[in-house]
Image (cartoon, rainbow, N blue to C red):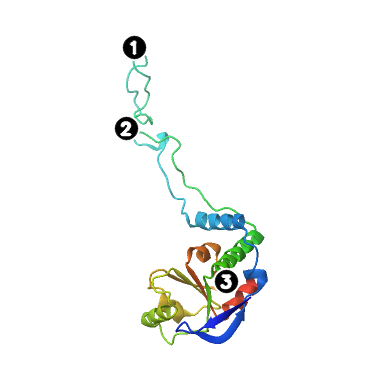
């Protein structure tokens, strides 16, 4: 499977990149994608939520009223959950939401996400591009040339490029990652996936 390499203006350079079928041409597995995205979102949760239970409330410990003869229910503490200001029953407690997922499942999920991008025609390959200095204006021009201005776009680099990252980080709806940081959620969350030349080989090395 071959894809044309585009320049900064969005025009074909006359060169093509071979997308390895074992990565970009697999049969997508929706359940693997579901599990990987679920784990990613779970890992983003702090899990620091907390409410006070009856034993943690500050208040008087005296008995509110006599046990019998009032015609109403027994009440032993102002801190009871049935009273305003009392503790909460089975309230949220700090916890860790993360869970284990096998490496092979995660690898299959990323392959499936990439395969969907290829099928939908939402994947493009950009020629090796670098910025002499961090220039947001130049990055905006790059987006315009690729007809991606205003679109949610994920750029994948073969290796870390500080000027490339700093140039694009302030523009909304754009995310820049290296091939080894690629995850299923980011791929599916982007409307367009742009692989900077060289990233294809790196992705193949990681996933195949």
The residue under label 2 is 84
Disc 1 secondary structure class: loop
Residue 70 point in image, percent of width and height? 32, 14
- Residue at horizontal 60 percent and vertical 81 percent from the top: 17
User: Residue 29 is drawn in which quadrant?
Assistant: bottom right
Residue 63 point in image, percent of width and height? 35, 23
Circle nearer the viewer, 3 or 1: 3
Q: How far apart are marks 3 and 1 (CA)?
A: 72 Å
The residue under label 3 is 180
Tag of residue 92 = none
- Residue at horizontal 63 percent and vertical 71 percent from the top: 206
Circle nearer the viewer, 1 or 2: 2
The one nearer the camera, 8 or 1, is 1
Residue 183 point in image, percent of width and height? 55, 65
The residue under label 1 is 69
The one nearer the camera, 96 or 195, is 195
Image quarter of the N terminus: bottom right
Q: Distance between the residues labelled 3 and 2?
A: 52 Å
Total marks placed: 3
- Residue at horizontal 47 percent and vertical 51 percent from the top: 47
Q: Distance between the residues labelled 1 and 2?
A: 23 Å
Disc 3 secondary structure class: helix
Q: Which label's residue is closer to the chain start, 1 or 2?
A: 1
Q: Are marks 1 and 2 in contact (CB under 8 Å)?
A: no
**Residue 89 appears in the picture as rendered:** yes
Disc 2 secondary structure class: loop
Q: Which label's residue is closer to the chain start, 3 or 2?
A: 2
Q: Do the residues labelled 3 and 2 touch (CB within 8 Å)?
A: no
């Amino acid at each position: 499977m071959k894809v044309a390499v585009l320049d900064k203006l969005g025009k074909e350079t006359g060169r093509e990149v071979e997308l390895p079928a074992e990565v970009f041409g697999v049969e997508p597995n929706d359940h693997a994608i579901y599990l990987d995205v679920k784990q990613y979102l779970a890992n983003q949760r702090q899990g620091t939520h907390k409410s006070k239970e009856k034993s943690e409330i500050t208040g008087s410990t005296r008995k509110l009223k006599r046990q019998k003869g009032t015609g109403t229910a027994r009440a032993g503490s102002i801190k009871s959950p049935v009273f305003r200001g009392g503790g909460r029953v089975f309230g949220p407690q700090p916890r860790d939401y993360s869970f284990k997922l096998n490496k092979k499942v995660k690898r299959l999920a990323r392959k499936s996400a990439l395969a969907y991008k290829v099928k939908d025609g939402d994947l493009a390959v950009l020629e090796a591009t670098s910025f002499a200095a961090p220039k947001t204006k130049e990055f905006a021009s790059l987006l315009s040339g690729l007809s991606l201005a205003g679109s949610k776009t994920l750029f994948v680099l073969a290796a870390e490029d500080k000027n490339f990252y700093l140039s694009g980080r302030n523009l909304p709806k754009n995310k820049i990652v290296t091939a080894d940081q690629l995850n299923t959620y980011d791929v599916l969350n982007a409307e367009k996936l742009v692989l900077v030349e060289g990233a294809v080989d790196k992705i193949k090395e990681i996933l195949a």
